[in-house]
């Protein structure tokens, strides 16, 4: 059985695996995402991580059937642009071609959330479901829809649940619009909001905890610690996030009537069952058909889900365009 | 070529046609929806309308391949319940069986908005599109999604765009939730809101026009007349409706990235190109991918679209469950 490589390219770390077609991992490597050097440095780091994972699996990279990469940003024919979470990556960069030339194997690139949800649909929490909504709750709020067992891409950009409007005229979002789900529930927006509240004189331990643990920003772990300490600002912002997730996911379910909602992403995975319970309960009053809500379930594949999902790209047909 | 019957069951009128498989109409009949006698009286009126349409087409009803009915409410295996726009129709009533027994032909029943959008997808504004969102703007705001050329039903209730939340904590909706699109844009909610404004002392000609034209409620025609006269309350409420439609449809497009949005329904058809232009413009700032918005187009099949769409049910496989 031919082995494949899979790489999950994140804002803070690069995760690489060697896996078989059933998603069983025989080698893995992790390294920090370069903060300098732009796309070229990131491509080099991906190449290095992939070689290390292959060594761990006891195979040569050249024997792999191919390598899949899940990337943030707008992905089109192997090029990535507008990767806001990555350093100096606004313009289109030919990631598939660059990594492919370095490794000597075919490389496929697709949107990071889509491949993670694909992995859950094929091998994880969504197994056996014909329709699925994946909600990846982290720095932003990403999504992906599976319809009749297949990822629904629309014209390439489907799944942007983070930019569904939950409050007309509401909080400003990074995308330029107002009232998006992500403006309330994205970790980036939540951190900005916390800083505003501090400027207005509200008291919180969030930024003290951040410094104490040597983090450059409010990570999921910092939010969890603040909640565990009963920090009022953290509680308020997380409550607002759950309310917005409930409204946005409820709206998405009313429109698509999927069987299940899988919750993943940095915050989603960190809060796990707690997040799933809260989201299901906040979603319920918004459902049009309240007597049979969809199952809300946590992602199962954990930290490696994105990389395993990326490895599944190898046998798939090349994608024309994926936007995030 | 076998002819089929199609019936559009509305809150105020019943429209029946005889059509071929290309949707060409050879006979039609229209009668008012009975306001007394409950589902049994409605079933009798459907039967009478269908016989009259057959007579118009010069055929016996018994020679039809079958009859399709588009109905409001929750449709499941030929029974209809919770048909709020119809008189005394809360409990499940076996509509397919009752009409089938009276006419002596097989009868299929499905949701009225779904069949109207199916007709637009197959024969009207959506011809040749692989993905489509139909938005039926009338007493309520109904919807239907076409994915890969086929209606997407989810677990039976997909398409409820009217119950997507556009304003958390916002205006009360008939469904019991707050902030639904329909609470701002449904003609029923708009009329309630107009009455509230009058109670608060605001001046409007809406109700005078309604009485002058002998209407029991604020019909699409009354709204149009009030707008043409520059009525401020009417303008304000229609503006709020367009804003909510823009947010809701923008959210739906961000999630599904469909090629086109078809606008139909009583108000949508009445305002035609004017509605389409306003909705496209209100939607645009909410789009995540602003550089290639979906086409927003008016429904083409007009008043008969629902009945023609219902006739298309005849060749289709029976549906397990359709909910509205």
Image: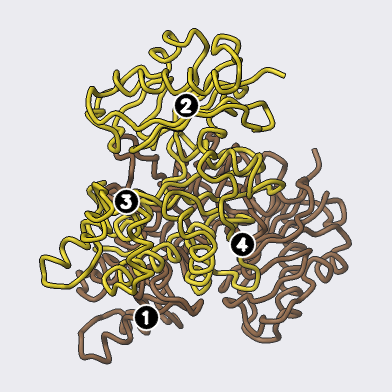
Chain colours: A brown, B yellow
Q: Secondary structure at mark 1?
A: helix
Label 3 and label 2: CA atoms lie apart by 33 Å
What is the crowding at mark 4: few (fewer than 14 residues within 10 Å), some, or many (at least 20)? Answer: many
Which of the marked residues, 3 or 1, is nearer the chain's N terminus? Answer: 1
Chain letter, disc 4 residue: B
Instruction: Indicate the secondary structure of the residue bearing disc 2.
Output: strand
Q: Considering depth in this image, is A3 or B102 the residue closer to the camera?
A: B102
* Quadrant housing residue A156: bottom right
Q: Is residue A129 visible?
A: yes
Query: Which residue in the protein does label 3 denote?
Result: A283
Q: How far across and down, in percent of the image, does residue B174 sit? A: 24, 48
On whether disc 2 and disc 1 are found on a single subunit, the reply is no
Determine whether label 2 and label 1 are within 8 Å by CB: no
Q: Going from the N terminus, do you reach mark 4 or mark 2 first?
A: 2
Distance from label 3 to label 4 (Cα)? 28 Å
Q: Residues within 10 Å of mark 3 (few under 14, many from 20)?
A: many
Q: Which mark is residue B87?
A: none
- Return the residue at label 4: B294
x, y percent for residue B289: 60, 69
Left/right placement of residue B236 relative to residue A189 reads: left
Pointer 1 residue: A210
Please identify the quadrant where the C terminus of chain B is shown.
top left
Residue at mark 4 to residue at mark 1: CA–CA distance: 43 Å
Task: Tell me where residue A236 sits by quadrant.
Answer: bottom left
User: Residue under circle 2?
Assistant: B69
Tell me the subunit letter for badge 2.
B
């Amino acid at each position: 059985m031919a082995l494949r490589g899979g790489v999950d390219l994140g804002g803070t770390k690069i995760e690489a695996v060697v896996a078989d077609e059933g998603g069983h991992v025989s080698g893995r490597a992790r390294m920090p995402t370069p903060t300098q050097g732009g796309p070229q440095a990131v491509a080099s780091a991906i190449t290095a991580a992939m070689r290390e994972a292959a060594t761990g699996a006891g195979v040569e990279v050249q024997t792999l059937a191919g390598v899949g990469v899940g990337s943030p940003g707008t992905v089109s024919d192997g090029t990535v642009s507008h990767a806001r979470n990555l350093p100096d990556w606004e313009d289109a960069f030919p990631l598939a071609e660059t990594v492919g030339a370095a490794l000597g194997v075919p490389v496929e690139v697709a949107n990071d959330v889509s491949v993670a949800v694909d992995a859950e649909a094929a091998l994880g929490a969504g197994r056996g479901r014909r329709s699925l909504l994946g909600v990846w709750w982290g720095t932003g709020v990403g999504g992906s829809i599976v319809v009749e067992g297949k990822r629904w891409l629309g014209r390439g950009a489907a799944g942007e649940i983070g930019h569904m409007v939950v409050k007309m005229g509401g909080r400003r979002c990074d995308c330029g619009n107002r009232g998006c789900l992500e403006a309330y529930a994205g970790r980036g927006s939540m951190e900005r909001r916390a800083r505003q509240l501090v400027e207005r004189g509200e008291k919180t331990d969030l930024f003290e905890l951040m410094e104490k643990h040597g983090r450059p920003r409010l990570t999921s772990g910092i939010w969890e610690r603040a909640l565990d300490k009963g920090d009022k600002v953290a509680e308020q912002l997380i409550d607002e996030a759950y309310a917005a997730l409930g409204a946005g996911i409820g709206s998405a379910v009313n429109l698509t009537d999927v069987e299940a909602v899988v919750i993943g992403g940095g915050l989603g995975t960190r809060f796990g069952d707690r997040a799933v319970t809260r989201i299901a309960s906040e979603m319920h009053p918004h459902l049009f058909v309240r007597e049979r809500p969809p199952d809300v379930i946590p992602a199962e594949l954990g930290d490696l889900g994105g990389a395993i999902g990326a490895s599944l790209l190898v046998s798939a047909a090349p994608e024309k365009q994926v936007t995030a």
